[in-house]
Image (spheres, rainbow, N blue to C red):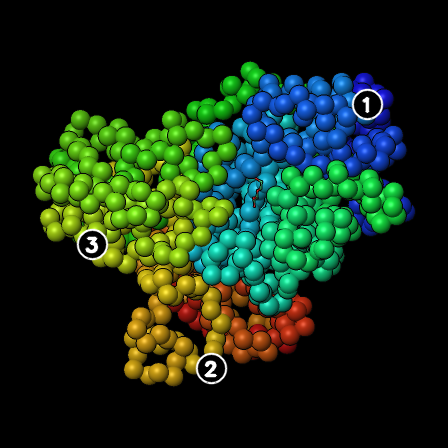
Amino acid sequence: MLNAATLKSLLVCSTVVLSACAMSSKTTSTTTSPTTPTNPTIEAILADLTLEEKVGQLHLINFEGEPTEEQLEQIRQGKIGSILKSNGAAQNLKLQQVAVEQSRAGIPILFQEDVIHGYKTIAPVPLAEAASWDIPAIQQSAAVAAREASAGGIQLTYAPMVDMSRDPRWGRIIEAAGEDPYLASLVAAARVKGFQESGEPGQNILATVKHFAGYGASLAGRDYNIQDLSERELREVHLPPFKAAVDADVAAVMVAYTAHDGVPLTANRYMVQDVLQGELGFNGLIMTDWATIFNLVRAGTAENLEDATTAAIQNSIHMDMASNQYSELLPKLVREGRVDEQLIDDAVRQVLMLKYKAGLLQDPYGRFDEALEKAELLSDANIAATKEMALKSMVLLKNEQQTLPITNEVKKIAVIGPFAKAQKDLIGWWPGLGEAKDVVSILSGIEAEFGDSVEITYAQGVTIDRFNKAGAELIPEAVKAAEQADMVIMVLGEQEWMSGEGGGLASLHLPGLQEELLRQVAKTDKPIATVIVSGRPYVLTDVAQHSDALLQAWMPGTTGGTAVAEILSGKFNPQAKLPVTFPQHQGQVPIFYSYKKTSHPFVEGITEDRYSTTYRDVPHEPLYPFGFGLSYTNYSYSDVTLNSTTMDLQGSIIASVEVTNTGDVAGREIVQLYLHDKVASVTQPVKLLKDFTILDLAPGESKTAKFTITKDKLAFIGIDYQPTIEAGEFVVFIGANSADVKSAEFSLTN
Ligand code: BGC
């Protein structure tokens, strides 16, 4: 019996020494696969387990609500190693006591949850956070989520999601960091570090990077659809953020629902063993996504569940989420000689290593403290941090005639739109334990910000009844409210369920009659500032046309309404820049800035030249390009200067521009560096983000943004799929966004 006391007595190494044990034994183990870390404590626990108990460790099951007697009995029998969706210090402590004190082996449970952008205090959705380009703030935001989740009895999150998507029809574009691999990689590493290492001991949780890999390329924006990536696109676009997460020491990887090159990831040896474990060097735990073992049969690549289960365990999939197939079939498959027990041992080592890293093997109860939980969830500090993040993530897309910020001359504001009072929609599709009642709506944020000095009226305008065109009868009242006001704030968008998993859309126009509502309100000729609540880029072409100002507020989290109001009032000067291209027409999708050079390049606008890649009916330019975002001030950029026009492989070039705040308020500008390799053996993007810097500028102030270009920034994936650098001419672009840049050229010599 390996109860809590016995378990503790096995802890021959202190916390510090144990990590050393783990590392040193990596090279000495002869019985395990080369990627499986081991240590003496784990080996001792493993040696004591029956086959059924080992398999129990690989079993990840969901508990929703109070556990049933049957579930408790499974824990007592050592059949459940990890639980997802069971929350709360009190509940998880109770379950932990059953596991530690009433099961024969006494191994603690690892509690897991989708802590995607917050646990109880909800931050902006991940796509929004990426719009801040503020990597330390993003890390901090994950740290807040980790602090709350760990206080709520959780030790592992299924985040960060790093799937690259260039198709806003795909609902899960909300969960990652946009279209660019460089920015997405920085965000991926920051989120891993934020979850795993930014808090005090005991306040961190383990991270799981997902969904390996290519899920964001689901065809036509339909979730779970086939993906058909070239080896090149896989390596240029989809793998970099996974590599960044692995390099940041992410604890776990979740494989995607989809198939790569026809083989579902759960059974895809090339992707999991060669690429993930081999090339990326990941040596931690790999888990399925929800019941993906079943999917091998559903997708028709396994004849039956026994074959599917065998394929998964033979592919280094260590943990089975929610299919129950490991627990039901593995003991039998081992006894029949179809599965080697060493594979099970390796997988158990991975699970125990996570439990060790989470501190559970050292102290199974240390993390479950209701008083701490009460103090941590929705604490003032957490609320303040998420508000800061929300402010930094909202992108000002249009601001004519200085409609914003709202001046003292405005005495009466009409707030109109079906999302003005929204609460649930502000925390998105995956809000952890976040509750609508804790969310500041945009209307109440505005009321609080403008106080008694301004009269605020409200009209719903239309109703959101799924995608139906509902609520036309409410439009006249909204128009009347607009007529009687000095200015209008329209709050339009999408409901939380429309984005996220399974949130594929064919139309990228705002749902229902919202565009019609705006057209009618615009006829009043009152100044209109429109705020968009969404988890994806919508086609905002008509919306922009009928608005004087446009603010992309995303799904901004618990304090979203306050943050919107502070931007409208000018208390906060917007600084965010789009991490994803906003199309001007949905037929342009997939659209992104870093397209490759072709034989028939794009030409501007609508062309009579039919022999170009441009459409005949719609220009190729987006409505708003990647990297775009306005401020309440203006910036001017000098020409780009290079300290040399040649460099060799050992050297570097410094590219600089002087940026001046030409307006009369202080601002923060995100200055972006893009490169283009003019001639290479493989077609190159017309521009590729390679660096950026954030400048704080007082009115009238100038600062120099300097970028050092070294050879790593000049590398591309060569013909042999290896990083390659070729001598020749390069163009350096520096600017305020991917379209508005100045350039200079240099050559790389051998
Ligand atoms: C999603 C994962 C998620 C899991 C557990 C799946 O359907 O694809 O991203 O972590 O469910 O909730």
Q: Secondary structure at mark 3?
A: loop
Q: What type is the residue that disc 1 sits on?
A: Arg
In this view, the residue in front, 113 or 320, is 320
Residue drawn at x 70%, y 28% is: 109
Q: Secondary structure at mark 2?
A: loop
In this view, the residue in front, 261 or 40, is 261
544 displayed left or right of 338? left
Residue 190 vertical placement versus 200 (above, below): below
Residue wearing tag 3: 546
Residue 43 vertical placement versus 276 (above, below): above
Q: What type is the residue that disc 2 sits on?
A: Ser
Residue drawn at x 14%, y 39% is: 477
Q: Give me the C-alpha separation between circle 2 and circle 3.
A: 38 Å
Residue drawn at x 83%, y 48% is: 339
Q: Earlier in the sequence, mark 1 or mark 3?
A: 1
Residue 42, x across and y down, in percent: 82, 34
Q: Which quadrant holds the N terminus?
A: top right
Count residues near mark 3 (Cα–Cα under 10 Å), then give few for <14, some for 14-19, many for 20+. Answer: many
Mark carried by residue 104 = 1
Q: Mark 1–mark 3 contact, CB under 8 Å? A: no
Q: Nearer the viewer, mark 2 or mark 1?
A: 1
Q: Earlier in the sequence, mark 2 or mark 1?
A: 1
Residue 275, x across and y down, in percent: 70, 58
Q: Give me the C-alpha separation between circle 1 and circle 3.
A: 68 Å
Mark carried by residue 599 = 2
250 displayed left or right of 173? right
